[in-house]
Image: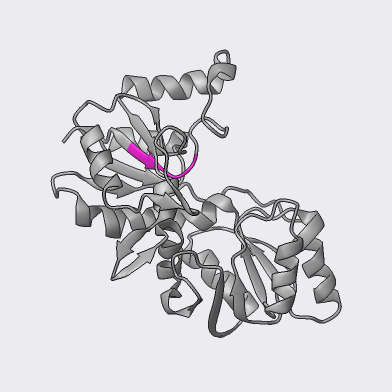
Amino acid sequence: MRKIEIIEQIKNHHYHEWLGKEINEETTRDQILFGDIDEECTGIITAIYASVDVIKHAIEKNVNLIIVHESLFWNHGDHTDWLLGNKTYQIKKKMMEDNHITVWRNHDYLHAGIDYKGRRVDGIFYGLLELLGWENYVHGNIGFPLILNIPKIKTEDLINEMMYKLNLNGIKCFGNINGYTEKIYLPMHITGNDNDKITVVDQENIDTIISMECIDYTLGIYVKDAAMLNIEKCIIAIGHFNLEEPGMKWYAEKFLPAILPVTVPIYFKQVGDMYQFVIK
């Protein structure tokens, strides 16, 4: 099958409405970010983003279609006009050109939802829930998981379990990691205007927040203050890419093989820890 045929077949198995609006093919994030879509597809790698290591892995596996969830060239919209003299850009671009690699971003369609086991699920966050064994602990709509009620666990044990299951070497945390966790909140992005999230944490009696981005000066210091008052609250700041990465693993291992011909090899490549930790 040609790459474009693969992409269209995948899109046909997703919902086309997200956040109350029809996905617009002209304005969606889900564009061909690089390469020729009319060539025959030799195989697929999914990844949270097409890092240099992911591209090298594709070359090793003789795969020429990389499906990513995030951008390729370090900016929203993947504009490259400002990168023409950039050395890293030139080398990365040449690697893909020389090996006929195409990169397709699947962001909006994955979040819009997939029919899986009789339910409409967000492909990214369902992958995380399944990895952690939390599919049945969602409070509300599993299509967009925000609050979960899990069996009571020591927060430090939860952190170590997540580090092991997400295959990470470290996790940044705020607040009290020595308490217990039963009620979890996934607020998605914590980027600066977070009064609503602080209100949810307080009113819903949240024990632990599992976050993507987490800046210091809103929810971060709120949780630290709460912990200083012996109120058991903690943020497990996994990071944007590492929290969504299990969804791309699930996509490669569970979803795509069910809808694509068996002749198309499919792999997942973990990007892994976004941070290195230097400890005093």
Query: In the image, residue 164 lies at what x, y percent?
Result: 50, 66
Q: Quadrant of residue 96?
A: top left
Q: On the image, which quarter does residue 94 sit in?
A: top left
Nearer-the-camera pick, 213 or 63: 213
At horizontal 62% and vertical 48% (from top left) the residue drawn is 275
The residue lying toward the viewer, choosing from 62 and 180, is: 180
Task: Please provide percent x and percent y for residue 271.
Answer: 47, 46
Q: Which quarter of the rendered picture does the C terminus lie within?
A: bottom right
Q: What span is colored magenta in the figure? A: 66-70
**x and y percentages locating residue 180 in the rendered image:** 66, 83
Q: Is residue 98 left or right of residue 183?
A: left
Above or below, comparing residue 69 to residue 4 in the picture = below
The answer to whether residue 86 of the structure is visible from this angle is no
Q: In the image as oriented, which residue stretches furthest toward the bottom?
A: 152
Q: Residue furthest top?
A: 85
Residue 108 highlighted magenta (yes or no): no
Main secondary structure along the magenta-highlighted residues: strand
**Quadrant of the frame with the N terminus:** top left
Q: Looking at this view, is 28 or 222 the one in front? A: 28
